[in-house]
Image (tube, helix red, strand yellow):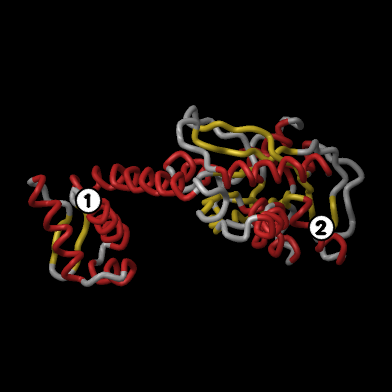
Amino acid sequence: MTLEQLRIFVAVAEREHVTAASRALHVTQSAVSAAIAALEERHGVKLFHRVGRGIALTEAGRLFLPEARAVLARATMAQTVLEEVGGLKRGKLRLVASQTIAAYWLPPILVTFRRLYPDIEVELAISNTLDAAARVRDGDAELGVVEGLVDDPALAQWPIGEDHLTIIQADAELPHKISRDWLCAAQWVMREEGSGTRAALEDYLAQFGVAPQDMTISLVLPSNEAVRTAIEAGAGIGALSSLVVAPALLAGTLHAVPQDVKPRSFYGLRHKERYRSRAADALLDLIKQQHAME
């Protein structure tokens, strides 16, 4: 099998549509069909069910898909290694970061990186902490920056920055003191399971003996902005990064509840066994320099 056949197979499998795959790869439909047929004939298996005008992966196709992706990821890394022979003149750096980091903490650093290395293309994906770790583990991203610790022996992780979690509400009348009863009675607007922000909040509440099942949760929303907007609209209280709520606090649309929350760390992630590019090293060096200046 060839890399081109693998690329075509993955494109068709992800879209479950030959025409969509051919358009994405800028090849003809006949070339796509021929590549899939060659793989199936060579190995004596069917990779797709063909039902009417639609297609779907067979069991063999489902088993083959992660292996094909892994081979393509290794091929991409091999190409990156060769492109770096002449220095940081070409190449692509694939990053993944959780929402708070990608939207508020990382962009100024990437602007500086782009100024220093204008020929390095940076591709940033946004996922919650657990999904970001999976992307790094699977080779979809070379580096990750997340808001919480990840339990994955395949990944190296280390502190790379920090921020503060802020409990916020729309009501200007703030409690004089946070108690367990107040925390349990409050209507909470939460991020989704797997979010580093949610995990940090649950760790903080555990200090008061408050478990997730003790909380009154009114809404669970998939982004920082959705949580902030819902709280501004009076849906309840919540906890978000100080980076996220700073403009709203300044504008007076939200108010910070008195609290003593320790700074939380941001963590870098990389696969222990995958090659780390010079572009990744350059970005990590830049982050280290910026963090030392804070």
**Which of the pair 241/205 is nearer the observer?**
241
Identify the residue shown where x is 7% and y is 46%.
44
Q: Quadrant of residue 32?
A: bottom left
Q: Amino acid at mark 1?
A: Thr
How many C-alpha atoms fall within 10 Å of the one at disc 2: few (<14), some, or many (≥20)?
some
Identify the residue shown where x is 52% and y is 49%.
86
Q: Quadrant of the C terminus?
A: top right
Q: Are marks 2 and 1 in contact (CB under 8 Å)?
A: no
Residue named by callout 1: 2
Q: Amino acid at mark 2?
A: Ala
Q: Which mark is residue 246?
A: 2
Counting the numbered discs, the total is 2
Residue 271: horizontal and vertical position, in percent?
Answer: 49, 35
Residue 269: horizontal and vertical position, in percent?
Answer: 57, 38
Q: Secondary structure at mark 2?
A: helix
How many C-alpha atoms fall within 10 Å of the one at disc 1: few (<14), some, or many (≥20)?
few
Q: Which residue is at the far front?
A: 86
Q: Does residue 60 appear to the left or right of 254 in the view shown?
A: left
**Which of the pair 281/292 is nearer the observer?**
281
Indicate which label's residue lies in the foreground, 2 or 1. 1
Lower sequence index among marks 2 and 1: 1
Q: Which residue is at the far right?
A: 176
Q: Secondary structure at mark 1?
A: loop
Residue 218: horizontal and vertical position, in percent?
Answer: 64, 54
Q: Is residue 255 above or below residue 153?
A: below
Q: Does residue 196 appear to the left or right of 152 in the view shown?
A: right
**Which of the pair 186/192 is nearer the observer?**
192
